[in-house]
Image: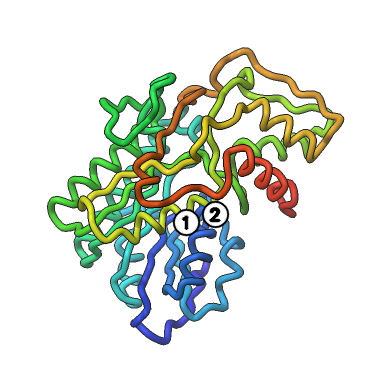
Amino acid sequence: MQSLDIQVESKSLQHSIIFGGAGFIGTNLVRKLLFHGHRVTVVDNLSKGRVKLLSEFTDSINFCFIEADISDRNQCRAAFLRIIEFGVGEVWHLAANSDIPAGVSDPTVDLKDTFMTTFEILLCMKEFGFKHINFASSSAVYGDWLDVPLHESLGPLRPISNYGAMKLASEAQISSASESFLEGANIFRFPNVVGTPATHGVIYDFVGRLRAQPEKLEVLGNGAQQKSYLHVSDLLSAMLVIRNRNNGPKVEIVNIGAADSGVTVSWIAEQVVARVSPSANIFYGADSKGWVGDVPKFSYSTEKLQGYGWFPKLSSTQAIRVAVDEIADQVEL
């Protein structure tokens, strides 16, 4: 596929490079950064991202898209050679495998798409003089602590999925790079994020199943899984608050999430059925987990983030209700 290249008139703008920028969170971040006057370059292999999600940005003189598999050393380096034509800038690393069960079945998926992307990006950052990285990590690095609140100083960390393991390995690699050449690294431990344009996730899956079979909804697990959910608009505002910090450690690790105990999967299923197919029957499985590697219930501490003066605008219940409407209204699933 041809890259979508837009000439940039000036090199005075702050340059933000978003790896994995053609996905759900990435496209929302592109919009936000362009609005704030940044030059934005997106690099994506389009395995999960969709180039059509970037179509609204292609008329901007401050936007460029490069298709590349950054887990491959030659492709990653070639992408950086293109990137530096527009100037050195900050890196936003969102590229990863987002299908946790796929990584359980085939561990090389997360090795390649979640860890090797980090490893190759850091190599090129060092070579080409990029000093700042913002990394999308995950609550999955913690593992299953039952009712113990998950806070940033908790340990030892024992992830129960390959996805979580490779995110944790990526955090370690970034920490190591900060000793040799990075001047600043923000590690965001993401929660369950909802909103549009959805490409995966529990609401997306439920809506898709009901569109295919309006008379019933089959749920993985017993529906008692309980987690907090954050709308993507709140996620973006939190990331930018952390990124704009003026002091603190060279490597800052912060949980991002809602300030509540969350909602159950069964409650989400009921909201989706009521919105999409009110006459559908809901059928649950017997297991407490939805899949191998799933953490069925956890309490996410956001006390550190609140110390930055940030609080979400939407609770978990509000975020789910908004996202159900947004995803149900998506033209294509």
Residue 220 image point, x, y percent: 62, 23
Residue at screen point 54% across, 54% down: 233
Label 2 residue SS: helix
Q: Quadrant of residue 173?
A: top left
Q: Quadrant of residue 287?
A: top right
Residue 249 image point, x, y percent: 21, 50
> Is residue 75 among the parts visible in the rendering?
no
Q: Is residue 58 left or right of residue 167?
A: right
What residue did someone put label 1 on? 237
| On screen, residue 132 above or below 86 | above
Q: Amino acid at mark 1?
A: Ser
**Which disc, if any, is residue 233?**
2
Q: How many marks?
A: 2
Residue 261 image point, x, y percent: 52, 30
Residue 306 image point, x, y percent: 39, 45
Q: Amino acid at mark 2?
A: Ser
Dot 2 and dot 1 residues touching (CB under 8 Å) = yes
Residue at screen point 41% across, 54% down: 239
User: Residue pushed farthest bottom?
Assistant: 9
**Which disc, if any, is residue 99?**
none
